[in-house]
Image (spheres, rainbow, N blue to C red):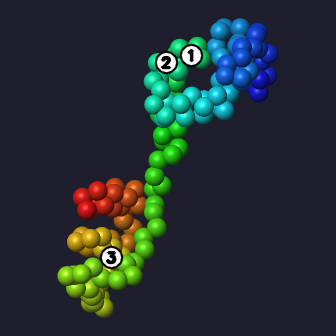
Amino acid sequence: MLDGEVPEKVEMVWGFAVPIRSGGRRKWPPALRAMAVERIAAGEGIREIAEEIGANKSLVAIWVKNAKRKNSAPAFFEVMPPTEVKPGRKPSVTVAPEDAAPTCRISIGDADIAIPPGYPADHLVEVLRAVRASQ
């Protein structure tokens, strides 16, 4: 094992060697964890998988939760300008006064959002997600 501790015994689970420490704790290989998560995503239950491999069901649930977190949407996404204007909608052109502070404007559907400089990115992500969800 990587931590320098020699396992007391090794158990084979789904073709993977799972080292068991003297206290009874198992060191689950990442490939086995990934396989368990894939099977749960395919429709098998957490309890059934946990019983099959001899793990605690709350541990298997944590594997699933961590996998979802890794696969979640990125904090930022590419914004592409429309190639053509939607029918029945006039293109909007706004001209800011020369003394106005610089801003970034984002139009999503009917929403027109002006973002001041220094606006917190994490809050902007939530605003954009909410606007997209309402469309």
| Crowding near the residue tagged with mark 1, few <14, some 14–19, many ≥20 C-alpha atoms within 10 Å | few
Q: State yes or no: discs 2 and 1 in contact (Cβ < 8 Å).
A: yes
Task: Tell me if I can see residue 108 in this picture.
Answer: yes
The quadrant where residue 6 appears: top right
Judge left or right: residue 105 versus residue 23: left
Q: Nearer the viewer, residue 122 or 20?
A: 20
Label 3 or label 1, whichever lies nearer to me, is 1
Residue 87, picture quadrant: bottom left
Q: Which residue is mark 1?
A: 52
Of tags 3 and 2, which is closer to the observer? Answer: 2
Say which of 89 and 63 sits in front.
89
Residue type (three-letter) at the residue carrying disc 3: Arg
Q: Residues within 10 Å of mark 2 (few under 14, many from 20)?
A: few
Question: Who comes first in sequence, dot 3 or dot 2?
Answer: 2
Residues at discs 3 and 1 in contact (Cβ within 8 Å): no
SS of the residue under disc 1: helix
Which residue in the protein does label 2 denote? Answer: 48
* Crowd around label 3: few <14 · some 14–19 · many ≥20 (10 Å): few
Where is residue 107 shown, x and y percent of the image? 30, 74
Identified at 53% across, 14% down, the residue is: 51
Q: Secondary structure at mark 3?
A: strand
Question: What's the residue type where badge 1 is placed?
Answer: Glu
User: Cα distance, mark 3 to mark 2?
Assistant: 51 Å
Marker disc for residue 105: 3
- Classify 63 as above or below 128: above
